Amino acid sequence: MLEVRDFSAGYQGNDVVHDVSFHVDKGEAVMIIGSNGAGKTTLFRAMCGLLRASSGVVLFKGHDVAGTPAQRVVRLGMGFVPAERHLFPRMTVQEHLSLGAYPKRPDPETMSIVLDLFPRLAERRRQRAGTMSGGEQQMLAVGRALMSRPRLLVLDEPTTGLAPKLAHEAYEALEVLRRQGLTLLVAEQQVPLAMAFCDRGYVLENGVIRFGGTSEELAKNPEVRRAYLGVT
Amino acid sequence: MTAVILDGIVLGLQFGVLAVGLTLVYGLGGVLNLAYGQMAVVAAIAAALGMDAGLPAGAAVGVGLLVGGVFGLLLDTTLLRPVYRLRGEARVLLSLLLTLGLAFVVDGLLTWQLPLEALTLHIGGGAVEILGVPMRRGSLWASGISVAVFVSLFFFFRGTMLGRAVRSIIQDEEGARLVGIDPNRMRTLILVSSGVLAGLVAVTRSMTIPVTVTSGISITIFALIVTVVGGLGSVAGAFLAGLLLGIINSVSSFYIGTFLTLIILLSAAALTILIRPSGLLGTPE
């Protein structure tokens, strides 16, 4: 589904991520874990075309999308939910969801899948995004991305700013999506949550992938345990 | 008094349409187009030349609007290219300087080549009585067209996918890209529409007073004042501010004098910046 090879990117000539390689297979849920400032956001933004990549390859469904602008990457079927969400503050839930299907008309079937997944959004169809709580905004950001029927959903820190209960619910929703066959790639600082959910993961430190493996392997790794799971 | 206020409404509706063309380009692209009045004048002169060449008025107006749109397209694809590479205040500043330069060039070319050309559209027929005040048919046509423009704009922004896409870019450009909207294409669309709107205002204005080759700068100034008062990037704000300032304009030119009127309008803009910097209906950054 997605294969990233020797990928470097950053801001104004200063690379933040260096020669990163990883892959996500169809139907998998994969996490990129790392501390604040490790380069997770830069990696995702560059991969999705919001930021210029300096070198490397991003193979998505067989096409190299490195350097392709975000608006085209999205239409190829890679949905991205950024940590800052980037909703439209003065637009309603309904307007967000129909724009999510842009340039097509919103498909009623997809719409009902999204509203079943997030009943809160169904209750608040006429509410403006700017007046919603953090948890609701997160649901809306995911819902908007789902409206284009992506094959791969990339989420940058989906639990940022959410209370523990809501963070749990967010992962429960992702679990539903995964059972429906969606492939997922998640960047996360709340490692225990992500680890329980994902099949595999990679550890990103200072812009470099230190190691990767299945969730069980990572859970056993002494460095991961010390740095991310709070075990001494 | 009724007559003065009705005149103000006629003018105000046109002010509103005028401001929409400027405010959308600013809201969407962060570009302040000081050659906006020249867009209107070029469209008007094209229509006037069309009529000189024997075209019927309707067709000549069509040519004018087309020329306005093409002006917008050319601006977007040539002069504004380097502007789009900058962000934030640097972008606004460069756009301001480049379009001001363009305004001088257009003004110079027009006064040199076609100094006497002007657009006047005579709408025949006698006066029509409204609220006991005889109104010229030209004024009524101008108002009708302006209202129709607002209604269609409202429908476009609320009811169509494309209109929502434009609004989404104004609210969050990155979010818009993430749903697959190409900001460059929307910007081109809006600049072309801005040229057409400028042309349309020139046409409606010429139904009451002639639009001459030197009208550009005053059109830009009026558009700027209305935009500031209404709020940058707000169509409803432009409508409201247009009406308000149109009425202020008529009342003050009738009772105080034309010379002081511009000062009063500018004071209204200054006051807005001081008290409510985001304008009547604009949203604070």
Image: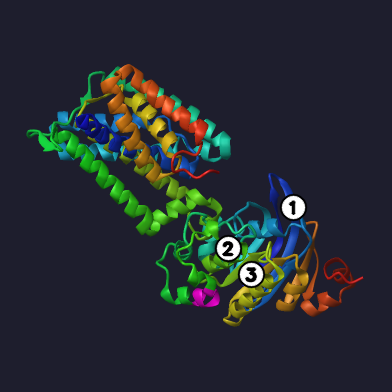
Image-quadrant location for residue B158: bottom left
- Point 23% across, 42% down: residue: B145
Residue B10 at x, y = what percent? 24, 35
Chief secondary structure of the magenta portion: helix
Nearer-N-terminus badge (3/1): 3
**Which chain is disc 2 placed on?**
A
User: From mark 3 to mark 2, how far is it between C-alphas?
Assistant: 27 Å
Q: Which mark is residue A137?
A: 2
How far apart are labels 1 and 2 at the CA level? Answer: 28 Å
The percent coordinates of residue A164 (x first, y second) are 71, 70
Above or below residue A25? Residue B111 is above
> To which residue does mark 3 refer?
A2
Q: What amino acid type should be assigned to the residue bearing mark 1?
A: Val
On residue B39, which mark appears? none
Contact check, label 3 and label 2, Cβ < 8 Å: no
A2 relative position to B8: left or right: right
Q: Residue furthest bottom?
A: A179
Residue that badge 1 annotates: A16
Between residues A136 and B46, which one lies in front from this camera angle?
A136
Question: Can residue B40 be seen by looking at this rendering?
Answer: no
Q: Find residue A139 and report its horizontal and vertical position in percent.
A: 58, 68
Name the front one of labels 3 and 1: 1
